Amino acid sequence: MLSVSDLSVSYGKVTALDGVDLDVPSGETIGVIGPNGAGKSTLVDTIGGFLDYEGSITYRGLEVSETDTPTLIENGLFYCTERRDLFGQMSVEQNLRLGSYLNDEGEDERLEEVFDLFPRLEERRSQEAESLSGGEQQMLSLGRGLMSDPEFLVLDEPSIGLAPVVLDDISEALTSIQELDVTILLCEQNLTFALEHADRLTLLENGTVQRSGTTAELQSDELVESYIGG
């Protein structure tokens, strides 16, 4: 579904990604792990169409650099950023409905599905997004992504800053999403969380790929342990 080939991204004279290759097959969850500054967020920002790059990124045959964001969304890609990018003074329900602005067929049904997945969002459907806790905002960000009826979900650090009990809720929701055969690219510093959900893992360090393999292969990899401390 997604193919990244010889990808390089620079901020001025600073190289953030250098020759990265990555494939995400349909129906799988691929985890990208690495410490702070490894290039994970740069990778997903580039896949989402927000950064210029050298090399190639194709999503369902579309070169990302030649495709506008609405077209990517219409073709099933939705990117949930680490920043969450919520509209703070809009209600929970309004934020959720924004996720379906390019595909409003079945919007009410999808809204109920999101509320089934995250009951706390239904309890707070009329609250302003900025009044939510960090964990609830993460649920809202993920729920808004689901409102687009995605085929490919890009997640940047969904576990960051969450209390363990909230992380359990996010993990349970992600498992439910995987059961719907949604393809997922999961960028995570939390190795335990990534191992729980990913079919395969890629380790980034200083903008380059250091290791790739199945979760079983990387779980016992000493290099992974030294970088992530998992």
Image (cartoon, rainbow, N blue to C red):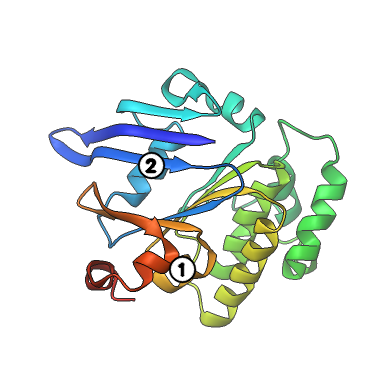
- Screen quadrant of the N terminus: top right
68 lies left or right of 73: left
Residue 128 percent across, percent down from the top left: 67, 58
Q: Which residue is depicted at the point 26% across and 34% down?
A: 9
Residue 102 percent across, percent down from the top left: 71, 30
Q: Is residue 178 shown above or below 75?
A: below
35 lies left or right of 4: left
**Viewer-proximal residue among 219 and 103:** 219
Residue 14 percent across, percent down from the top left: 15, 39
Q: Residues within 10 Å of mark 1 (few under 14, many from 20)?
A: many
Instruction: Give the structural element (helix, strand or loop) at label 2.
Output: strand
- Label 2 belongs to which residue? 22
Q: Is residue 207 visible?
A: yes
Q: Is residue 75 shown above or below 137?
A: above
- Screen quadrant of the C terminus: bottom left
Q: Earlier in the sequence, mark 1 or mark 2?
A: 2
Q: CA distance from mark 1 to mark 2?
A: 18 Å
Q: Which residue is depicted at the point 46% across and 26% down?
A: 64
Q: Is residue 203 visible?
A: no
Q: Is residue 39 shown above or below 61?
A: below
Amino acid at dot 1:
Leu
**Viewer-proximal residue among 101 and 19:** 19
Residue 123 numbered mark, or none: none
Q: Which residue is depicted at the point 64% across and 29% down?
A: 75
Q: Residues within 10 Å of mark 2 (few under 14, many from 20)?
A: some
77 lies left or right of 44: right
- Residue that protrudes farthest toward the top in the picture: 66
Q: Quadrant of residue 202?
A: bottom left
- Residue that protrudes farthest toward the left in the picture: 13
Amino acid at dot 2:
Leu
Residue 195 numbered mark, or none: 1
